[in-house]
Amino acid sequence: MFDIQTDNSRIILNHQGRRRAEIYLFGALLNRYEIELTDGSRFNAVQGYENPQQARETLTAGFHSAKLSPFACRIRCGQYRFDGQEYCVGKHQIAGHAAHGLMYDADFALIGSGSNAESAWAELAADYRAQEAGFPFAYRLQIRYCLTAQGLETVTLVRNTGRSAMPLADGWHPYFTLGGSVDEWTLQLNSRSRLVFDQDLVANGEILADNRFANARSLAGIELDNSFILDSFDRPACILRSSNYRLSIFPEPSYPYLQIYIPPARQSLALENLSGAPDCFNNGLGLTVLAAGEEKRFATRYVLETCESEAA
């Protein structure tokens, strides 16, 4: 049985006795993704916020669960060239480079929701009205969260509402935890290569072989802030596992990159589905160009499970 609860700041999708997701209208942030345990307690795998107000006040400290649009990660020095014109964008900068897009702090409207015997879902929307001089391209961003017995699916639909073509990359920035330290978990990736970054984490367009995580590998002592190129989409892009829990991510081909970041506290890690490489406005890797009136869909699915029986 599925149901949905909404108020003026958040949405809760509930699969009674099994799993639950909490979404904020601010930023369309995924703040909690929980499964219910045999003792009736819940385990939450998302490192989020205490409430929507805290999210507003602290979002840019780590961009937890932020929507990355219309670009993901970095644009070198905030500068790019598109359709013969030079642009400079920089709403937020890290080490002098534009970071994490323009819509991460947008207030979304709930435009639809529902539940039935098979799912609970909510659809949110926000309009970018070309208010930044460095990105004068209007578009509409619609995000649909759907909780089913197969996990939590997020679908993003971007529609160019302007009069000219626009560059685009789409992504997410959630931080996940399986309890305890990252050093106690294993990671497996459906990838054998990653992008080459410079010292400021800006991709230079080169690709490097990297099959360290082709099989499940301990994360003990490993540092990661890398963008991996997915090999295929017929199996999970990523499996993160502890002794008690397993998180699997199933992106569609619209998200061919997986950015992974382990913060210094090592209590969580960011697993970021990306449609285009960092700095794709310049290097062209995965860059989407939407014609006026055109739209594109991006989707991924998260599956959180217990694995206590396997560990035993």
Image (cartoon, helix red, strand yellow):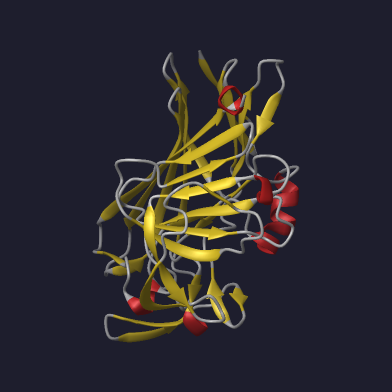
Q: Does 172 sit above or below residue 121?
A: below
- Along the line of sight, the residue nearer the viewer: 107 or 246: 246
- Determine the residue positioned at 58% across, 22% down: 309
How many numbered marks does the figure carry? 0
Which image quadrant is residue 25 in?
top right
- As drawn, is 206 to the left or to the right of 179? left
Q: Does 284 sit above or below residue 238?
A: below
Asked whether residue 122 is in view, the answer is yes
Image coordinates of residue 307 in percent, x first then y, are 57, 28
- Along the line of sight, the residue nearer the viewer: 126 or 73: 73
- Determine the residue positioned at 67% across, 58% down: 59
- Along the line of sight, the residue nearer the viewer: 74 or 270: 270
Image coordinates of residue 58 in percent, x first then y, are 73, 58
- Determine the residue positioned at 57% across, 24% down: 19
Image coordinates of residue 267 in percent, x first then y, are 71, 50
- As drawn, is 300 to the left or to the right of 132? left
Can you say which quadrant of the picture contains the C terminus? top right
Which image quadrant is residue 20 in?
top right
Asked whether residue 101 is in view, the answer is no
Q: Does 254 sit above or below residue 81?
A: above
Image coordinates of residue 87 in percent, x first then y, are 41, 83
